Image (cartoon, coloured by chain):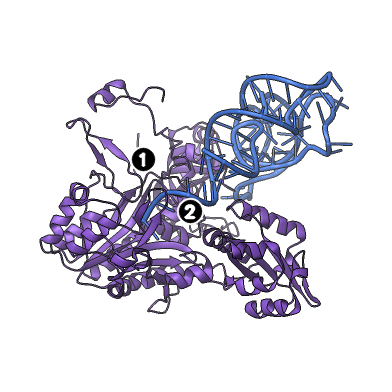
Amino acid sequence: MLYQRTATCGDLSSDHVGQMATLNGWVDAYRDFGGLVFIDLRDRYGITQVVFEPDSGAELQAQARELRNEFVVGVKGIVAPRLAGKENPKLKTGAIELRARELVVYNATPTPPFEMHGPAPNEELRLTHRYLDLRRPSMLKVFETRHRLGQLMRRMMSEMGFLEVETPILGRSTPEGARDFLVASRVHPGHFYALPQSPQLYKQLLMVAGFDRYFQIARCFRDEDLRANRQPEFTQLDVEMSFVDDVMVTSTMEKLVAEMAREFTGHAPELPLPRLDYHDVMERYGNDRPDLRFGVELKDLAPIAAMTEFKVFREALEGGKRVRGICVPGGGGRYSRKDIDGLAEYAAGMGGKGLAWIKVEDAGLTGPIAKFFKPEAQAALLAIFDARPGDLILIVADSQAISSLVLTSLRSRLAAELDLYDKSAFHYSWVVRFPLLAWDAEENRYVAEHHPFTMPLFEDLHLLDSDPAKVRAQAYDLVVNGEECGGGTIRVHDPVIQSKIFALLGLSPEQANEKFGFLLSALRNGAPPHGGIALGFDRLVMLYCGLDNIRDCIAFPKTARGTDLMTGAPGTVDPRQLKELHLRPIQGS
RNA sequence: GGGGAUGUAGCUCAAUUGGUUAGAGCACCGGCCUGUCACGCCGGAGGUUGCGGGUUCGAGCCCCGUCAUCCUCGCCA
């Protein structure tokens, strides 16, 4: 039996006093006074207090007294003003209450495994009962923001002339990039579809088709290990444009970025956004997605290290390694020797073999390695960091990769711990001119830094033959608060350059043709110069909701090991299904 | 694949150096209560301390293994 509702739990106000109303919802709380029972009734739109008074009848009162948290009920009653002075300003509907006349219990639920009020229970439990977790108001808020972001993107992209096109989920596996999720074909024994890592190739083909401006809010799949900001399936705003260079793509997308910022932070960044050179950023911040809400830049300390007698530094330099450091304002006063040991342990977790430190004090430099710094070295150290008493200097002598990783991680951690920036601030920038290729020592070949269809910078084209590692790409990443929120490139539309790049990637013409024949053929058949970008939709939701975890903005996410605790996916399947798909488990696994 | 953290009542947590019968708040059950709003008061029930071994007179606590969740390196754009 359904009481058809005449209002939601967020609707009723003084305007409705005296009217009959019917509400449906969940019992958010019950307060039983014996002669008087109150129910807070909750739905997506709000909470309305329902009161069961003695004059409503013994039967109804007895029924009301049986209600428990999270029961699903319908109530018919009369909207009445609350007693004078008993209004609840915390509720939108706090001026009134519903005097119950009839009650129906749709679902008398068992005691919930956790409470909807108060702090969230552990995540394992939340994911197991996700439908209950999503009832918590903070979760609903995230999904309202997520919805608004999607609407804003659709509106902006449409206004800018982009055409929304859907592309296949069942595609074909291509080499390079992430590991594919595969789907076995029943009709074609031994053949497989792959789920898209992104709609990359399709959107390029849409440009060849002349669609000119394409976008899609697209689901992407990558079978790689997960992180706080990575799920096996995630959503991107996928974009492609024809007859553009990199500045045209970024300047178009900036308009969207500014609109998002205005909508979700109340403050739009100044355009154009800063365009930072990849190599410069790597040197100054140690990664390609620098958090620019604060300084604390990495400095090359090789010249100063060479002035010292400290063996660790000297050997590092002689071994072709780097000596770099950061200076953390106020860190010297805040971090004890033991705290710094903790930082060293943190660094060790990332492969750092040691963490040298020096405290800047009024009397000079202190710490175990300070004695290796002669006065002129001390002065140089203070000068390069513009260090002041109370600061903490952290130095790493290690490979380019390790010193970068350790210092950039310490930089972020310490800035957060020391409150070196406004946590509510947003900083947007482009990082541009990425390397086109990276040398893969294991496979003994180049691999694409972004993907194999990335166009080199025109001025670097000649290096493709002589020094491929030096070739820079027409690539750009959108970085927000140290998070990579998007990335794209201008694509190769010239079959000759494309073949050259395939060759560098170790793909023979035959292999390239086998894997990408359709693309190469399309490029030969009238491909315009084109390029695009994809924004990480989930990551943007995270940022604008202040979440530190991508799972909290996905309705039904996977755990770090890729399982769904609610459904039990991935699960075993009936042997008959395997047989139909021509699959047989490998012995012993 | 590597490193780290966590796992005690339905939930959130506590339990001194390894030492009596593992506690508290919330939730749950029973009772009382006519203006509460995360009501209040009284009473009650609820535990294989993730799981399996081991050390010990004695283990929630120490050791080994294992499972799950989270963070992270590798991986991934």
Residues behind callouts 1 and 2 on a single chain: yes
- In this picture, residue B29 sits left or right of residue A168: right
Q: Is residue A417 visible?
A: no
| Residue A134 rendering spot, x and y as whole percentages | 46, 46
A247 and B69: which is toward the camera:
A247
Q: Mark 1: which amino acid?
A: Tyr
Give SS at disc 1.
Answer: loop
Q: Residues within 10 Å of mark 2 (few under 14, many from 20)?
A: many
The residue drawn where x is 41% and y is 25% is A589
In three-dimensional space, the C-alpha distance between marks 1 and 2, rounded to whole angstroms, equals 20 Å
The reply to whether dot 1 and dot 2 touch (C-beta < 8 Å) is no
Q: Nearer the viewer, mark 1 or mark 2?
A: 1
State the quadrant of the N terminus of chain A: top left
Residue at the image point whose x is 47% and y is 50% from the top: A552
Residue named by callout 1: A3
User: In the structure shown, which secondary structural element does the residue marked by tag 2 occupy?
Assistant: strand
Q: Is residue A281 visible?
A: yes
Image location of residue A34, percent across then percent down: 62, 37
Q: Is residue B66 rendered to the left or right of residue A485?
A: right
Tell me, what hue is chain A? purple
Q: Is residue B54 above or below residue A496?
A: above
Q: Which residue is mark 2?
A: A80
Looking at the rendered structure, the kind of residue marked 2 is Ala
Q: Colour of chain B?
A: blue
Q: Position of residue A486 (x, y in %)?
A: 37, 62
Picture quadrant of residue B57: top right
For disc 1, the neighbor class at 10 Å (few under 14, some 14 to 19, many from 20) is some
Q: How many marks?
A: 2
